[in-house]
Image: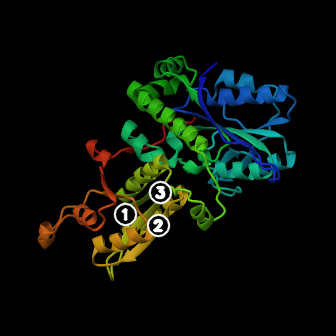
């Protein structure tokens, strides 16, 4: 067996009377080669032996003979061939999967980006359609493909992963299973040619598959699944009305609400991801606020950064707001009071010029205005590295 099932998080079963939607199970790992696809196929065989109708919607063996052999005996939906820029690309045939309507569909590589001209841009969106049709799905993903971890993985490995998925995709899965393997065992598999072809082994060993990278990614994967376990165990209670609760003398829980101060430049995306991770750990809502100077006009680069910020907020499920004011501290203070903010996160200020150098720094002004609110300056960890990170993927899952 390629990997050990170390940790799993399960959501409560659906209540009676709800519309039947498929259940999603995700095998997650620290890197390619730990055995996620292998475990997915083992799961499929077990369900088939139990009498369920199981098909493979999409399988990527990456030339691994053991994986290809394990797929034998499971019906497979033929891939759809899509022409794009004089290249033929093979994708999952979503309409064929829906027409076949199995009880369980195995769909590899949840973070995959589809070719243009198919139904959806991303495979996780295909999976949403399959689930909506009442079909259960088992899928796979590497931890570095989670959007909120993008910066952290870049800091650890020096490689920026381009294909990401919203964390919510994994968070709403009914079951998340960690496929764990020690870095030493994974490197042994890599050297034996069980992960990549022989001509790619040296490049992998010299780049992404370094022992320090894998050790750090393993810790990230363990923490991520532990967080999913905690989130799914967290009890929720529905109270008919706040007035009724107060009348009964029920104590009201004081929830955290985080506010990240952003500006339209690329570094703000790192701050947003860090803030979102903090919000998830605290089970808190996250607001983003940009205080625009009156009459401020943005150049093309800043407009693109602002658009990217809005898109990132939408992906992570945060709410983004804009206020116009000459006094940033006053605008933030008023906004924080209206929203019930308990925690403010901001990046390091750019060097002040002229008279601004003698002004009290923004964090101190915020603490003076909001004595009951925590203020945190988020460090730019990428600044510790020499040069910019390479824009590359570590390889297929």
Q: Which image quarter: residue 156? A: top left
Residue 51 against residue 16 in the figure, above or below: above
Instruction: Give above or below for 272 relative to 97.
Output: below
Q: Which mark is residue 273?
A: none
Mark 2 crowdedness (10 Å alpha carbons): few <14, some 14-19, many ≥20:
many
Proximity of marks 2 and 1: CB atoms separated by less than 8 Å: yes
User: Which quadrant of the rendered structure holds the C terminus?
Assistant: top right
Tell me the mark number nearer the camera, choosing from 3 and 1.
3
The tag on residue 254 is: 3
Q: Residues within 10 Å of mark 3 (few under 14, many from 20)?
A: few
Task: Tell me the tag on residue 320.
Answer: 2
Alpha-carbon distance for marks 3 and 1? 26 Å
Left or right placement of residue 100 versus residue 168 in this view:
right
> How many residues crowd mark 1 within 10 Å: few (<14), some (14–19), many (20+)?
many
Per the image, label 2 sits on a secondary structure element best described as strand
Q: Quadrant of residue 33?
A: top right
Q: Earlier in the sequence, mark 3 or mark 2?
A: 3
Q: Residue shown at 79%/45% (left/top)?
A: 135
The answer to the question of whether label 3 and label 2 lie on touching residues, with beta carbons closer than 8 A, is no
Residue, far front: 248
Mark 1 falls on what kind of element? loop
C-alpha distance separating marks 2 and 1: 9 Å
**Vertical placement of residue 45 versus 225, above or below:** above
């Amino acid at each position: 067996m390629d990997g050990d099932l170390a940790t799993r998080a399960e959501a409560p079963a659906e209540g009676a009377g709800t519309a039947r939607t498929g259940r999603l199970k995700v095998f997650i790992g620290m890197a390619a080669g730990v055995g996620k696809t292998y475990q997915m196929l083992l799961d499929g065989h077990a369900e088939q032996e139990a009498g369920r109708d199981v098909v493979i919607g999409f399988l990527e063996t990456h030339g691994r003979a053991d994986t290809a052999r394990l797929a034998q005996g499971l019906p497979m939906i033929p891939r759809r061939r899509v022409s794009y820029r004089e290249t033929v690309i093979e994708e999952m045939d979503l309409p064929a999967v829906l027409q076949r309507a199995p009880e369980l569909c195995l769909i590899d590589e949840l973070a995959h980006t589809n070719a243009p001209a198919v139904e959806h841009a991303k495979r996780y969106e295909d999976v949403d359609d399959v689930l909506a049709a009442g079909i259960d799905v088992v899928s796979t993903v590497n931890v570095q493909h989670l959007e909120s971890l993008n910066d952290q993985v870049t800091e650890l490995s020096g490689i920026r992963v381009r294909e990401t998925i919203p964390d919510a995709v994994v968070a709403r899965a009914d079951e998340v299973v960690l496929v764990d393997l020690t870095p030493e065992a994974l490197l042994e598999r890599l050297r034996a040619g069980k992960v990549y072809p022989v001509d790619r082994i040296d490049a992998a060993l010299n780049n992404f598959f370094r022992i320090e990278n894998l050790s750090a990614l393993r810790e990230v994967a363990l923490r991520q699944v532990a967080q999913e376990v905690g989130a799914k165990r967290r009890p929720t209670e529905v109270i008919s009305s706040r007035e009724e609760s107060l009348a009964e003398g029920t104590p009201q829980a004081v929830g955290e609400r985080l506010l990240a101060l952003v500006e339209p430049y690329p570094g703000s995306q790192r701050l947003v991801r860090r803030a979102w991770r903090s919000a998830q750990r605290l089970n808190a809502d996250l607001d983003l606020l940009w205080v625009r100077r009156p009459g401020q006009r943005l150049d093309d680069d800043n407009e693109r950064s602002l658009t990217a910020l809005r898109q990132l907020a939408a992906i992570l499920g945060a709410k983004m707001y804009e206020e116009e004011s000459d006094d940033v501290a006053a605008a933030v203070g008023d906004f924080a009071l209206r929203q019930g903010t308990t925690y403010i996160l901001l990046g390091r200020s750019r060097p002040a010029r002229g008279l601004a150098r003698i002004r009290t720094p923004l964090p101190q002004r915020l603490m003076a205005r909001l004595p009951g609110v925590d203020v945190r300056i988020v460090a730019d960890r990428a600044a510790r590295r020499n040069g910019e990170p390479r824009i590359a993927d570590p390889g297929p899952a």
